[in-house]
Amino acid sequence: MSAPPPVVLITGASSGIGQAAALAFARRGAQVAAVARRAERLAELEGAVNALPAPHGDVLPVTADVRDPEAMRAAVAQTVERFGRLDVLVANAGVGQRGSLVDSDWDALETVLRTNIDGVLHSIRAAVPAMRRAGGGHIITISSVAFNLTSPYAAVYAASKASVSSLARSLRLELEADHIRVTDFLVGRTATEFNANRLGEGRRTGSGVPTMPAERVAEAIVKTVGTRRTTVVLRPFDRLVIWANVLAPGIMGRLARQQYR
Ligand SMILES: NC(=O)c1ccc[n+]([C@@H]2O[C@H](COP(=O)([O-])OP(=O)(O)OC[C@H]3O[C@@H](n4cnc5c(N)ncnc54)[C@H](OP(=O)(O)O)[C@@H]3O)[C@@H](O)[C@H]2O)c1
């Protein structure tokens, strides 16, 4: 991380990867705007940051829904008002899904699409003007190894992450002249509330897939800020899954179907 410590806005900071990232940034002295819907969880995060050994950064809890563009513009405005600028966006908020593409309740599928796609777009569109005023910045998108996975019974989630990674690729070139970097994280299975909170009715065992702690993803996010990395894949296992899907999508899809159905 370059000095002075950056001002960072993290969406989905009330649990899992976002919460771990907020703590990791604050531990290094960064100022963190922590965005999510659950105010009580953000208050707990604020307490945890204040309990860190000094010196540490501050946290600004912001209760907002990433699906609401006005709320995201307000979140950025609050961040700039409190910390003076915005350097880093971690577009992390997201929800999982399980179940049939055709038979699932539309409300669940729509929530996944609106959160994982629109939410990332609203976050980026709100953050970039402030980064331009600051003379540059870094956007980190939290996608998934599922971005290119054949994913029967988690198809809408996989499609939403394909969108995130596609947006990141194009955005990187659109923002080059503004000195704003874009890094896409293709995250593998991580121990968070994500699986328990997947929307939809399907069954999912997920057996045999190695799980990593959220802190590992968080540390990698912190270390990526200021680098020119375009894509981050954390584990050899995740790399293997991504490449197996390129080379043998049908076989991988049948394996995945056994896990989800
Ligand atoms: N865990 C995994 O295995 C895994 C693997 C690959 C990728 N990922 C990705 O990692 C990201 C973080 O997930 P996680 O594993 O840390 O799961 P998590 O513990 O369930 O965290 C999800 C976060 O997103 C927030 N969120 C959800 N909907 C929101 C909305 N409409 N507005 C604002 N915030 C919202 C939640 O906060 P509130 O409910 O308080 O709003 C929560 O803080 C997601 O994008 C997920 O797709 C996770």
Image (cartoon, grey):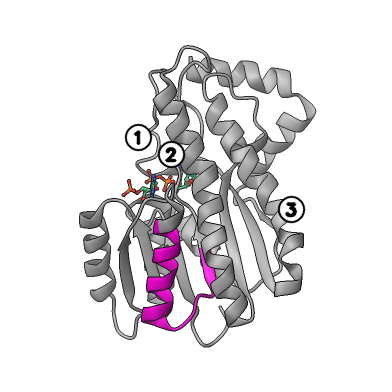
Between 73 and 220, the one nearer to me in the picture: 73
Circle nearer the N terminus (3, 2):
2
In the rendered image, residue 188 lying in the magenta stretch gets the answer no
* Badge 2: residue crowd in 10 Å (few <14, some 14–19, many ≥20): many
The magenta-colored residue range is: 71-89
Residue 170, labelled with which disc? 3
Residue on which the image places disc 2 = 95
Q: Is residue 214 left or right of residue 40?
A: right
Asked if ligand 1 lies within 8 A of label 2, the reply is yes
> Can I make out residue 237 in this image?
no
Q: Is residue 245 visible?
A: yes
The amino acid pointed to by label 3 is: Ser
Label 3: how many Cα within 10 Å (few below 14, some 14–19, many 20+): few
Residue under pointer 1? 197
Measuring from the top left, give residue 223's x and y in whole percent: 56, 69
Query: Horizontal placement of 148 versus 73: left or right?
Result: right
Please tell me whether mark 1 sits on a helix, a strand or a loop. Answer: loop
The mark that comes first in sequence, 2 or 1, is 2
**Which label's residue is closer to the chain start, 3 or 1?**
3
Q: Is residue 70 left or right of residue 242?
A: left
Task: List the single residue furthest toward the front.
Answer: 70
Residue 227 placement: quadrant: bottom right
> Of the residues tagged 3 and 2, which is closer to the observer?
3
Q: Does the numbered disc 3 mark a residue whose Cβ is under 8 Å from ligand 1?
A: no
Residue neighbourhood size for the residue with mark 1, other residues' Cα within 10 Å, grouped as few (<14), some (14–19), many (≥20):
few
Foreground pick, 191 / 39: 39
Q: Are marks 2 and 1 in contact (CB under 8 Å)?
A: yes
Is residue 114 depicted above or below 20 in this figure? above
Q: Amino acid at mark 1?
A: Asn
Identify the element where label 2 is drawn.
Answer: loop
